[in-house]
Amino acid sequence: TLRKMLKDSTKSPEFVKTVPKRGYQLICSVERLSPFSTDSNTDVEESASEHEAPAVELEASDTPPTEIVTDTTADLEPQVEPTKTQPKPASNTINWLPRVIIFLSLLLPVCVLLFTNPAESQFRQIGEYQNVPVMTPVNHPQINNWLPSIEQCIERYVKHHAEDSLPVEVIA
C-alpha cells in the first residue's frame, strides 16, 4: 500500500492522514522532479520547508478531502521513482552441492559395472538329445520330470530347422 511504500506510520503520519468516513488526505507537499537533474535533491529539501505551512493550511481548511486527494494524486505519481535493485551474485558454494550429488549418482552405477564381475555359474549336464547337450545350473533343483518335454522340444526344433545350424547347448 501507499503507506507501506512511504513508511508512514498511522499513529503520527507525515504523508497520508486517514479521514474517518471520507478516505485519505495527503498532508505533505508534492512537486514534480526531473529524473536527470542532480540539483533537484537540494531544491526539494529547500522547497519542502517552504511548503510545510500550506500543507497544514490544507488540513485545517473546510474543503472536502476527496478534492484534495483527486488534485494531488496526479502529482503524486511522478514523484515515485522505481528503486533499482542490484542483482546479487550467485553464490558458488550453494550451486556445487547439487552438481556433485548428480555426478556421484551417475558415477556409482558405472563403477559397479566396471569393477565387479558377475559370479560364473557352474552347470551340470542332465542329458543329450540329437547331439545337443542339456545343461542345468548346479544350484537348480532337479527337473527329471521335465526331461521328456525338453527332449520333445529339441527334436521338433531340429526337425523344423534342418537347414539351419543346430543349437550348441540347451540350458534348462
Image (cartoon, rainbow, N blue to C red):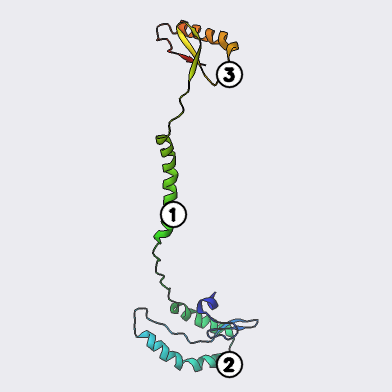
- Give the residue number, with chain letter if any, for mark 1: 97
Give x and y (percent) for residue 163. Answer: 40, 6
Q: Secondary structure at mark 3?
A: loop
Mark 1–mark 3 distance (CA, rounded to whole Å): 50 Å
- Give the residue number, with chain letter if any, for mark 2: 60
Q: Amino acid at mark 1?
A: Leu
1 vs 3, front mark? 3
Quarter of image, res 17: bottom right
Vertical comparison of 92 with 51: above or below: above
Q: Amino acid at mark 2?
A: Ala
| Of callouts 1 and 2, the N-terminal one | 2
Q: Residue at x 48, y 80 (%)?
A: 76
* Total numbered labels placed on residues in the image: 3
Give x and y (percent) for residue 85. Answer: 41, 70
Q: Residue at x 41, y 87 (%)?
A: 44
In the picture, measured across the screen, residue 23 lies left or right of residue 94, that is: right
3 vs 2, front mark? 3
Q: Secondary structure at mark 2?
A: helix
Q: Residue at x 37, y 78 (%)?
A: 35
Graded by Cα atoms within 10 Å as few (under 14), some (14 to 19) or many (20 or more), the crowding at tag 3 reads few
| Of callouts 3 and 2, the N-terminal one | 2
Mark 3–mark 2 distance (CA, rounded to whole Å): 105 Å
Graded by Cα atoms within 10 Å as few (under 14), some (14 to 19) or many (20 or more), the crowding at tag 2 reads few
Mark 1–mark 2 distance (CA, rounded to whole Å): 63 Å
| Of callouts 1 and 3, the N-terminal one | 1
Vertical comparison of 115 with 27: above or below: above
Q: Secondary structure at mark 1?
A: helix
- Give the residue number, with chain letter if any, for mark 3: 141
Callout 1–callout 2 Cβ contact below 8 Å: no
Vertical comparison of 76 with 128: above or below: below
Residue 28 or residue 131, whichever sits in front: 131
